[in-house]
Amino acid sequence: MATFRETLHGGPVDAAEVTRVREVVMFEEPALRGRLVRFFVLLVLASAIATFGLYADSVATVIGAMIVAPLMLPIMGLAFGIAVGDGKAVGSSLLVGLAGVATAIAVGYLISFIMPGAFDPTTNTQIMARTAPRLVDLLAALATGLAGAFAIGRRDVSDTLPGVAIAISLVPPLANVGILLGADRPDLAFGSALLFATNYLAIVLTGSFVFGLMGFPATVLHDVKPRIRRAAVALVIVLVIVVMVPLGFSSLKVMATHLAESRVGEATESWLADTDYRLVSAVAGEGRVDVVIAGSGDVPEESELASSLKGQVFGLPVHLEVLPATVLEFETQ
């Protein structure tokens, strides 16, 4: 009767399967040079496509960049290295991944110099959508790590990896960082970098978890000496902690932001209940919560809203913008 690991993997995990997965995700000899050339050529092209797509505010173009981008491979390589306690694999995957990150940011930054000088990133929906991680981004990244490791770990679904890469935003936030640095908006660039870091760490954590469930660590460490095995297990524990600490901090920030938006939105709607105003939006970002309301007549005392939010939004100030509402009537006959 098949064990849970064999059922999850689609069969027993043997040395041949370990070799197959390493060939998919690792940058190692004898094919190291060819893999690196392919990786960086595709990454530069994907970063350029993403940058132009972000400037054009084009969803389709940004998705095209995500299809081309190969950045998922070193991330999965890092997850695999952590799962099997292979320090060399962790180091090489981390090095390739960091070089890829720097390349994507550099491409976005360099392209920003050939774009119109009067460009205002705050008017671009695709750029602004990638300036801060949200709770849904974190959850999507966690699911992507599960799907990515599952796709690589099973031979019969490995062809779905490009689809997994499309599901998560990796290269576009990095291109965004370059664009925003070129536009002299380091505050927004930091938000994009945090979005990428949150996605990166979440994928690594859940990816290594799935590789572990499939039984890759047991196969890799089966024949090694007990002392080496203990060292490998200790390495896995350390690496998981290293991943979980920053992911935990960024996750708490994302959840706090989401909770602040929700509380401000609910409090504002209650505050406006007996007026002709309505809530347009409540968005947390850049160290405050921006609230937009629209309507006519007298605006209620803001002290009432401030009082209801006291101690509820983690000390974030609220910026309230009041818009006049225009009502138009016209005949349709």
Image (tube, helix red, strand yellow):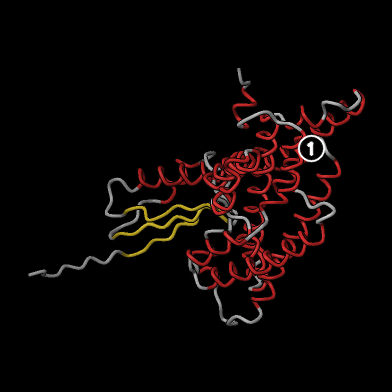
Residue 213, image x and y in percent? 67, 29
Looking at the image, which residue is at 35% across and 43% down? 270
Camera-nearest residue between 209 and 322: 209
What is the three-letter code of the residue carrying label 1? Leu
Can you name the residue that lies furthest to the left here? 333
Mark 1, Cα crowd under 10 Å, few <14 / some 14-19 / many 20+, is some
Camera-nearest residue between 161 and 135: 161
Residue 133, image x and y in percent? 58, 51
Q: Quadrant of residue 114?
A: bottom right
Q: Which residue is mark 1?
A: 239
Seen in the picture, residue 98 relative to 40 is either above or below; the reply is above
Looking at the image, which residue is at 66% across and 57% down? 70
- Which quarter of the image is occupied by the C terminus? bottom left
- Which quarter of the image is occupied by the N terminus? top right
Query: Can residue 314 be seen at all in this image of the molecule?
Result: no
In the shown orientation, is residue 292 left or right of residue 118? left
Seen in the picture, residue 194 relative to 152 is either above or below; the reply is below
Residue 156, image x and y in percent? 58, 40
Mark 1 falls on what kind of element?
Answer: helix
In the shown orientation, is residue 277 left or right of residue 104? left
